[in-house]
Structures are given as structure tokens and as C-alpha cells.
Amino acid sequence: MEALVLRFTNAFNRDNLDEVMTYFAEDAVYETLEGHHARGIPAIRAAFEPQFRGVFGRLRFITQDMLVDEAAGKVVLQWRCQHDLSQAWGVTGSERLKQLLFRTGIGQAFHWEGLDVLHFAQGRLRRKQTYSRAKLPLIRRGGS
């Protein structure tokens, strides 16, 4: 499974959305770092599309650590996401303004850290949950 996850990550780093999508099962679920759920390949693809268009700049995921539980089909992948905003490729209008604000406030290059909890079955990704290191936790209403 480690090699599978590294190939999956490499597809992200080559900006190859078509290849990334081949790793997902038809009924897979992607939980974003904001807590949104995308169910099924079309919804997951739509959730990733801005990233692959360059809305957030050129992204590279650097693997920092990986914990693999082959028997359970689970992987915890710790990574650092590097952003390069030196070129405004693939963006228009408000997306370009967003990049300009990031470049002005943070700079052209920055990174953040996070992890994915990946659930596999029959060699396909069934669930991808993304979490990030943040100053403030994602707070939700209600007790459950």
C-alpha cells in the first residue's frame, strides 16, 4: 500500500487530475479540510478541479511520514503542502485577485502541514479524509 500511496501523491505533484481520479472507487468519499463531503467520482473531481487549475498556485505535496495498516486497508499520510504563486496560470477574475492577496500578505511561496487518512478496499481509495495543522480548530455546532 505504501507504493500505491506514493504513486497517488506523485500524480498530484504532476498535476494529473485524470490519473488521481483512477485511484478512487466509484462510491468513494472525500472529506475536505473544511469538513465538506464529496461523494462519488464526479463530485470528488469537482472538489479537486480548482486545485489542478492552479487557483492556489502550483502545489507540491512532500511526504513527511506514513503509517500503513495493511490488514485494515488504512494509511495515515503526513505531508507538507508547498505553494508557488509566482505565476498566475489557469486562473481568471476573482481567483487571480485571491492569488494577488496571498502574494501580498504571505509571499509567493509558502507551505502548510497536514495529513490524510486513506481507506482502501480492493486496491481503490474508498475514503480520503484531509486534516491540517491550524491555529484554530474547525468548530461545528451541536454535540455530535
Image (spheres, rainbow, N blue to C red):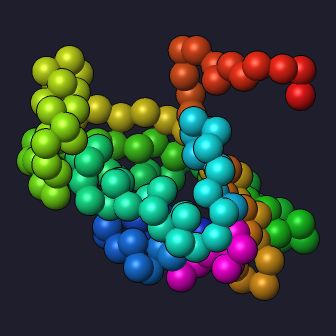
Q: Position of residue 39 (x, y in %)?
A: 66, 63
Left or right side of 105 for 48: right
Q: Tell me, yes or no, whether the highlighted magenta stretch contains residue 10.
A: no
Q: Position of residue 75 (x, y in %)?
A: 73, 59
Q: Main secondary structure of the magenta part?
A: strand
- The part of the image, by quadrant, that contains residue 85 is top left
**From where the camera sits, is residue 115 visible?**
no
* On-image quarter of the C terminus: top right
Q: Which residues are magenta?
A: 22-28
Q: How many marks?
A: 0
**From where the camera sits, is residue 61 visible?**
yes
Left or right side of 41 for 75: right
* On-image quarter of the N terminus: bottom right
Give the residue furthest to the left: 87
In the picture shown, does residue 134 fall above or below 53?
above
In the picture shown, does residue 132 fall above or below 56?
above
In the picture shown, does residue 6 fall above or below 113?
below
- Residue drawn at point x = 61 percent, y = 57 percent: 38
Between residue 3 and residue 38, name the one nearer to us.
38
- The part of the image, by quadrant, that contains residue 28 is bottom right
Left or right side of 62 for 136: right
Q: Position of residue 117 (x, y in %)?
A: 70, 52
- Residue drawn at point x = 64 percent, y = 39 percent: 35
- Residue drawn at point x = 68 percent, y = 78 percent: 25
Between residue 4 and residue 50, name the one nearer to us.
50
- Residue drawn at point x = 89 percent, y = 20 percent: 143
